[in-house]
Amino acid sequence: MRVYFSHPTFTFRTRTETTCVEIIDEVLDPDEIVNPTEYGLKDDLKSIVHGCDVVVGMAIENKYTFLVWNEMEEGKEHGADIYTIRVKNKENIGELEKGFQEGTKRLSQEETDKFTGELLKQNRSSFLTLLFGNWGRRF
């Protein structure tokens, strides 16, 4: 089984990402976990999503960011099983849940930009933190 892990770019290379990958590995026991962190922002990941049996999307504070829910929908349209992992912060990561979760909002691109900006402002993340990760921050 091949699993695609869709999550916001601000969680790339963080403790949250690592913990979520461990949960996915433990619960689903896949042959491969495809992590977009390994591909960079320039790559078109649609064809990769199409080749996966499962798409796991990360919801932050009961919100799917625009890219995450789009990748989940893309996977669903191509026959993948859908799972959600809800995250409040790096210490509060939920279980893997099947499907899109009721009560979890799907943000537009504009809402995602605003939400991400607010989170990063709250956490005082710098540009270098976005590039290289920071194990001491909220995510």
Image: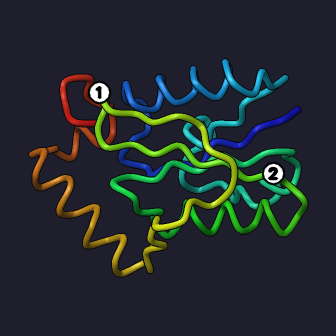
Question: Residue drawn 62% across and 44% down?
Answer: 97
| Cβ–Cβ under 8 Å for marks 1 and 2 | no
Q: Amino acid at mark 1?
A: Glu
Coordinates of residue 8 in the picture (x, y in percent): 45, 52
Q: Amino acid at mark 2?
A: Asp
Quarter of the image with the N terminus in it: top right
Residue ID for mark 1: 91
Give the number of callouts.
2
Residue 13 as seen in the image, left or right of residue 75:
left
CA distance for labels 1 and 2: 27 Å
Residue 114 as seen in the image, left or right of residue 45:
left
Q: Is residue 3 above or below residue 99?
A: above
Q: Is residue 75 above or below residue 90?
A: below
The crowding category of the residue bearing disc 2, from other C-alpha atoms within 10 Å (few below 14, some 14 to 19, many at least 20), is: some
The crowding category of the residue bearing disc 1, from other C-alpha atoms within 10 Å (few below 14, some 14 to 19, many at least 20), is: few
Q: Secondary structure at mark 2?
A: strand
Residue ID for mark 2: 81
Q: Secondary structure at mark 1?
A: loop
Question: Residue drawn 72% across and 49% down?
Answer: 55
Residue 22 vs residue 105, the one in the foreground: 105
Question: Residue drawn 75% across and 27% down?
Answer: 28
Residue 34 as seen in the image, left or right of residue 53:
left
Coordinates of residue 41 in the picture (x, y in percent): 54, 53
